[in-house]
Amino acid sequence: MRVTNINGTTDDTCPCGSWLDHWKRLGGQLPTYCPEESCYQKPEAGARVQKDGSTDWYIIPLCSIHNDMQGEALTVSDHVRLVPAHAKKTCGRP
């Protein structure tokens, strides 16, 4: 699946503590490797992405190298769970 790493994720906050913690809370067990199709690094950050053809924002775990590629299109595994990036509608509820 093609996604674009969106700029500005550090401007928003999540009550989970970090976007990676947000993904772990809602997405399940952290994958062993970064879901970028040719990467074997450990996922270290929760990155905000948009799936091609969508305007919705999601969080996926990425390694630090791919997380730093903001604004870039990436091909990631179809098996990675796209977790909604709307903290107020998910983990931010009282």
Image (cartoon, rainbow, N blue to C red):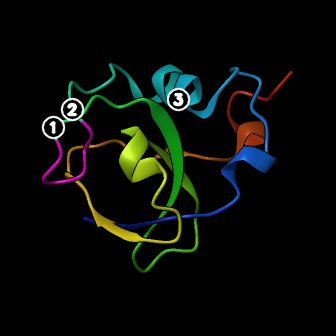
The reply, left or right, for residue 10 in relation to residue 23 is: right
Q: Quadrant of the N terminus?
A: bottom left
Kind of residue at disc 1: Tyr
For the point 72% across and 38% down, which residue is it? Answer: 87
Sequence-earlier tag: 3 or 2: 3
Label 2: element kind: loop
Sequence-earlier tag: 1 or 2: 2
Whether 37 is among the magenta residues is yes
- Between disc 1 and disc 2, the foreground one is 1
Kind of residue at disc 3: Leu
Q: Considering depth in this image, is 29 or 8 the residue closer to the camera?
A: 8
| Residue 50 position within the rendered picture, expressed as x and y whole percent measured from the top left | 49, 66
Q: Name the residue carrying label 3.
A: 20
| Magenta-colored span | 34-39
Kind of residue at disc 2: Tyr
Whether 78 is among the magenta residues is no
Q: Considering depth in this image, is 87 or 18 the residue closer to the camera?
A: 18
Q: Counting other residues with Cα less than 10 Å from the Cα at mark 2, is it few (<14), some (14-19), or many (20 or more)?
A: some
For the point 72% across and 45% down, which residue is it? Answer: 10
| Residue 81 position within the rendered picture, expressed as x and y whole percent measured from the top left | 35, 42
- Between disc 3 and disc 1, the foreground one is 1
Label 1: element kind: loop
Sequence-earlier tag: 3 or 1: 3
Residue 40, which numbered label?
A: 1
Q: Name the residue carrying label 2.
A: 33
C-alpha distance separating marks 3 and 1: 18 Å
